[in-house]
Image: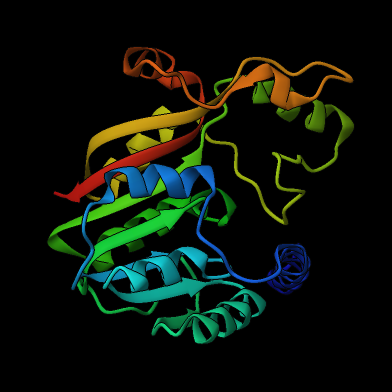
Amino acid sequence: MTDSDTRNRYEDWHRELAAREGAQGAPDATWHKMVLRRLGSVQGLHVAEIGCGRGDFAIHLARQGAHVTALDFSAEAISIARERARASGVDVSFTVGDAEDTKLPSGAFDLVISCECLEHVPHPAKMASELRRICRDGGRCILTTPSYLNGMLIAWAWSIVRRKPIDTGAGVQPRENFFLYFRVRRMLERAGFRVEDMESRIFVLALLPRVDPARLRIMEFRSPFLNRLFRPAGLHFLYDMRPR
């Protein structure tokens, strides 16, 4: 698939999702909740969100007093995000760009955030290095991305057998990388980050024919001990990092 084909499919994908979503609301995806739970105050911070999609999280951060620059590959997503920001009365610098080569200034951001983007780029290691480049020394980077050391392995195997793209839950996307959390961590460390903490959510126990996948997964354990015990089997991983 050419870059043009990929871009056009992402434009359609964002357009369809925006039509279903309606007006902008609070960011309530699992990965957004994971980030917000540990984020703390962003008042006055210069924040970059890479892979901002239709802008909901960037708008939320701006409402909390951050100076936000938000980038996405999709022009359609950025157009929707700008309209949502105007309707919300907040100032966010939205830009169309490449997560592997953002063109943003080196070391310009106190906080770099990327939620569920790394799995969709052609060269994830290059994107990881770019996140490190724009994060200032002494700054912080929080990234989320899937890991498939869980029941989703069955879905990946079935997609290979059928020779069809995988649907990981949000519809078939133009590009989906297969990740395991320990390989992602190694990639981030090679890019120049020190991973200070990790956590995961949505524990996919199995996938069975004609059974709703939601019945075979646990979103989160009440016990912190169990969340840590089952962390390797989580579907969505968060990496809390500092530049080395």
Q: Considering depth in this image, is 60 or 11 the residue closer to the camera?
A: 60
Q: Considering depth in this image, is 112 or 182 the residue closer to the camera?
A: 112
| Residue 166 image-quadrant placement | top right
| Residue at 65% in and 47% down | 176
Q: Position of residue 161 (x, y in %)?
A: 84, 27
| Residue at 39% in and 12% down | 226
Left or right of 175? Residue 81 is: left
Residue 218 vertical placement versus 26 (above, below): above
| Residue at 48% in and 30% down | 201
Left or right of 161? Residue 139 is: left
Name the image quarter holding the N terminus: bottom right
Q: Position of residue 232 (x, y in %)?
A: 44, 20
Count how many numbered circles sit on residues in the image. Answer: 0
Scheme of image coloration: rainbow
Q: Position of residue 244 (x, y in %)?
A: 13, 49
Residue 136 vertical placement versus 225 (above, below): below
Left or right of 100? Residue 211 is: right
Q: Is residue 202 visible?
A: yes
Q: Residue furthest left?
A: 138
Residue 7 vertical placement versus 169 (above, below): below
Left or right of 115? Residue 8 is: right
| Residue at 25% in and 62% down | 111
